[in-house]
Image (spheres, grey):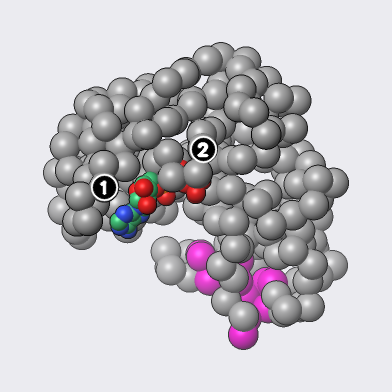
Amino acid sequence: MIQMREVSKTYDTGVVALDHVNVDIKKGEFVFVVGPSGAGKSTFIKMLFREELPTKGKLLVNGHDVVEMERSEVPYLRRELGVIFQDYRLLPDKTVFENVAFAMQVIEAPRRTMQRSVNSVLDVVGLRDKYRSFPSQLSGGEQQRVAIARAIVNNPSIVIADEPTGNLDPETSWDIMDIFKRINKAGTTIVMATHDRNIVDTMKKRVIAIEDGRIVRDQMRGGYGYEA
Ligand SMILES: Nc1ncnc2c1ncn2[C@@H]1O[C@H](COP(=O)(O)OP(=O)(O)OP(=O)(O)O)[C@@H](O)[C@H]1O
């Protein structure tokens, strides 16, 4: 499902953000990506949806060759992925419903399917009753739940999240993690970069630790493993 072979990323500035990374992630896995600030976690995550390209190495995501693919193929890769960010990235002048529906309009889903799917994912994240609200009228946790609904509405096989609980208090963070757990139980692969020690230590999932652009640990049922 995700295969990185000797992947390196050097930015234009000369910074080596990833250095000969090898990883295999299988369908249905739940993977935390941890490491100190500047270690290369976001770069790792961004390569999965081709926001950044490796400068060396091979990367397959869902069978797509991310490095060699034509630009015209990129939307096909992205519609198989759901991406979630720390800062939610909702459209401020659209309602909850419209924010989620927008992700389906982009792939030109029929109207009836769209209505049904949007309602169904708003149920999954527990926000059906807020469908007419605007992002500014929601708490941070609610906004992140809208972002998750938007990310899963097209049934992605992989959900990729970069610090999704980074702006949330511990209790709200656990609400978000409960949604991720449910999505994962339904078969979706989850790859999540995080600084949240408590979440990683409690959930006991696979942990990929990156330091200075290198994988220094790849452990099933792992813990966070750094000093606070
Ligand atoms: N667009 C860019 N141009 C140049 N250098 C970059 C760029 N993005 C990241 N870097 C550098 O690459 C290295 C890895 O950054 P990255 O954002 O992947 O780290 P991170 O582990 O996600 O950090 P954090 O936990 O602070 O978010 C850092 O040295 C960073 O300064």
Residue numbers of the magenta segment: 93-104
Q: Is mark 2 within 8 Å of ligand 1?
A: yes
- Asked whether 85 or 185 is in front, the reply is 85
Indicate left or right for 160 with 3 as reference: right
- From the viewer's perspective, is 177 left or right of 220? right
* Mark 1 close to ligand 1, CB under 8 Å: yes
Mark 1 element type: loop
Q: Amino acid at mark 1?
A: Val
Where residue 74 appears, x then y in whole percent?
27, 55
226 w.r.t. 67: above or below: above
Q: Where does the image place residue 90, in percent across and percent down from the top left? A: 59, 70
Residue most extreme to the front = 227
Disc 1 from disc 2: Cα separation: 16 Å
Mark 1 or mark 2, earlier in chain = 1
Q: Which residue occupies 44% across, 30% down?
A: 210
Q: Compared with residue 47, is residue 30 higher up or lower down, i.e. above or below? A: above
Residue 44 drawn at (x, y percent): 38, 40
Numbered tag placed on residue 15 in the rendering: 1
Q: Position of residue 163 (x, y in %)?
A: 58, 48
Tell me the SS state at disc 2: loop
42 drawn magenta? no
In-front residue for pair 164/94: 164
Task: Name the residue at 19% across, 56% down.
Answer: 12
Q: Is residue 42 left or right of residue 223?
A: left
Amino acid tagged 2? Pro
Q: In the picture shown, does residue 14 fall above or below 5?
A: below
In the rendered image, is residue 116 in sight?
A: no
Q: Quadrant of residue 22?
A: top left
Taking depth in this image into account, of 91 and 115 the one nearest to the observer is 91
